[in-house]
């Protein structure tokens, strides 16, 4: 009997452990997408229509757009709305989680017939099949992958027969602009070699992003170095242990930055720069917002950053009385500029409200949020008779509409015209190859392969850092 009781206790314990593990797994997988900013202007009142947006954007952007969109929608449609922000991680992590979610949803949809298939064989989910209306931010590459979508092999039983199917579903769905509207909003669909929007409207650019260097002037001065103006400046041996980088396998923005370095310097010389830069790093983090913060606090001398992360952190330090110790530099002759898009999620709960948000993002009011001074009575007036611009935070991002530079450039916080400084070097399409190289298998049990080669620090290469040529 004791043995039986012992066996029973063991079995119950194991079952309880399995239940606990299963519960924890649900929490781990589910909590990220349930996270919401809960910031200014995003409170939910009874009867308020809600737009659910998943985004990698920082709280400052969520604050301003949540508040301003609610005011705009009330004025234009006479209806109260709020935004439910979901922030599970960086762009690449969001995309991977969306892909996993869609694969599970497709399998369920084939069982419940909760889908339709268009003339191209692309599956369209019924409204409400997915929990999110919009993905905002993250770069054209990842939004292009949302358009490409996922393919799932599944089967469906009809009567006595079973049909095997390979179903492809796009994670995003097209917006509803006419071509004449797009022409009026954007003009030529081009900045450098990049597009401002997807011609089929699966993603629409809302702002422009450049990719450069955030640095601490005080630390550079102590190290006896001039302020950086090129990526090559981050390969100096004096910066060993002083560079902060995000992991490009988890951050879409840093992957884009690495890709731009390879595009401008060429595969061989670009990798020399990346290896040397990586050799100087103190860490690789999964969040692209961490390096600018550590740089501002003197924990690192420099890091790679999207322009608005770098400029935004510089603004935070300046506003708190820290002076101009934090700087941001767009590398000379190598400024890669990309659209920062919005995509409507296929099968989201409220397509109509989602399309309204996309249209709002391209109004002068919304574009002014990116670059106008905060709460400034001198800002130009909007349609409501109030000064345009952000209420709480200077976002310091570049608007995507050319007309904003023509009409309002003198009101911009940053006197930068991306259409003038963009590099014309065409992206060679090496991003996937770079990603594979960064994710190569480990050598031996638990031993990673150093990206600069075994037993050799970057400044010990046969080609000294100062002798690299570009192109």
Image: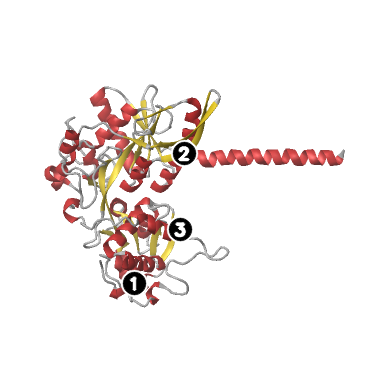
Q: Is 290 left, or right, of 449 in this rendering?
A: left
Mark 1 — residue? 236
Near mark 3 (Cα within 10 A), the count class, few <14, some 14-19 or many ≥20, is few
Contact between labelled residues 1 and 3, with CB atoms less than 8 Å apart? no
Contact between labelled residues 2 and 3, with CB atoms less than 8 Å apart? no
Mark 3 — residue? 439
Q: Position of residue 4 (x, y in %)?
A: 83, 39
The residue sitting at 27% across, 66% down in the picture is: 227
| Quadrant showing the N terminus | top right
Q: Position of residue 86 (x, y in %)?
A: 41, 38
Q: Position of residue 263 (x, y in %)?
A: 29, 60
Picture quarter containing residue 376?
top left
322 or 417: nearer the viewer? 417
Query: With respect to residue 336, does 111 lie above or below?
Result: above
Q: Position of residue 127 (x, y in %)?
A: 39, 27
Q: CA distance from mark 3 to mark 2?
A: 25 Å
Contact between labelled residues 2 and 1, with CB atoms less than 8 Å apart? no
Which element is circle 1 on?
A: loop
Which of the two discs, 3 and 1, labels the residue nearer the N terminus?
1
Which element is circle 2 on?
A: strand
The residue sitting at 53% across, 42% down in the picture is: 28
Mark 2 — residue? 152
Foreground tag (1 vs 2)? 2
The residue sitting at 37% across, 73% down in the picture is: 237
Near mark 2 (Cα within 10 A), the count class, few <14, some 14-19 or many ≥20, is some
Query: With respect to residue 81, does 362 lie above or below?
Result: below
The residue most toward the front is 161
Foreground tag (3 vs 2)? 2
């Amino acid at each position: 009997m004791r043995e039986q009781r012992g066996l029973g206790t063991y079995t119950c314990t194991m079952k309880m452990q399995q239940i606990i593990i299963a519960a924890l797994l649900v929490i781990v997988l589910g909590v990220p997408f349930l996270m919401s900013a809960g910031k200014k202007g995003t409170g939910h009142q009874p009867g308020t229509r809600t737009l659910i947006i998943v985004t990698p954007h920082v709280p400052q952007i969520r604050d301003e757009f949540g508040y301003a969109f609610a005011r705009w929608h009330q004025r234009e449609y006479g209806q109260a709305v709020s935004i439910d922000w979901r922030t599970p991680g960086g762009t690449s992590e969001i995309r991977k989680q969306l892909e996993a979610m869609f694969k599970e949803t497709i399998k369920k949809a084939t069982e419940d017939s909760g889908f339709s298939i268009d003339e191209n064989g692309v599956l369209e989910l019924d409204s409400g099949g997915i929990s999110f209306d919009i993905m905002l931010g993250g770069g054209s590459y990842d939004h292009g992958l949302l358009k490409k979508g996922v393919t799932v092999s599944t089967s469906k039983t009809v009567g006595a027969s079973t049909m095997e199917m390979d179903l492809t579903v796009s994670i995003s769905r097209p917006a509803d602009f006419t071509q004449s509207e797009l022409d009026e909003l954007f003009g030529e669909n081009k900045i450098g070699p990049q597009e401002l929007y997807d011609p089929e409207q699966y993603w629409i650019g809302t702002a422009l992003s450049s990719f450069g260097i955030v640095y601490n002037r005080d630390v550079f001065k102590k190290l006896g170095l001039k302020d950086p103006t090129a990526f090559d400046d981050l390969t100096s041996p004096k910066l060993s242990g002083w560079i902060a980088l995000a992991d490009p396998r988890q951050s879409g923005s840093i992957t884009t930055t690495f890709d731009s370095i390879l595009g401008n310097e060429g595969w061989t010389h670009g990798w020399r720069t990346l290896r040397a830069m990586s050799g100087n790093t103190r860490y690789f983090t999964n969040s692209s917002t961490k390096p600018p913060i550590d740089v501002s606090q003197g924990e690192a001398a420099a890091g790679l950053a999207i322009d608005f992360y770098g400029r935004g952190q510089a603004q935070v330090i300046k506003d708190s009385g820290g002076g101009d110790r934090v700087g941001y530099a767009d590398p000379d002759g190598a400024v890669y500029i990309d659209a920062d898009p919005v995509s409507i999620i296929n099968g989201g709960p409220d397509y109509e409200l989602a399309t309204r948000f996309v249209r709002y993002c391209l109004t002068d009011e919304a574009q002014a949020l990116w670059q106008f001074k905060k709460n400034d009575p001198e800002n130009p007036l909007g349609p409501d008779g109030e000064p345009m611009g952000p209420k709480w935070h200077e976002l310091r991002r570049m608007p995507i509409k050319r007309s904003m530079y023509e009409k309002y450039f003198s009101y911009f916080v940053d006197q930068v015209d991306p259409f003038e400084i963009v590099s014309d070097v065409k992206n060679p399409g090496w991003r996937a190859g770079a990603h594979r190289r960064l994710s190569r298998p480990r050598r031996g049990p638990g031993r990673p392969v150093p990206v600069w080669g075994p037993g050799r620090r970057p400044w010990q290469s046969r080609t000294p850092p100062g002798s690299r040529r570009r192109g």
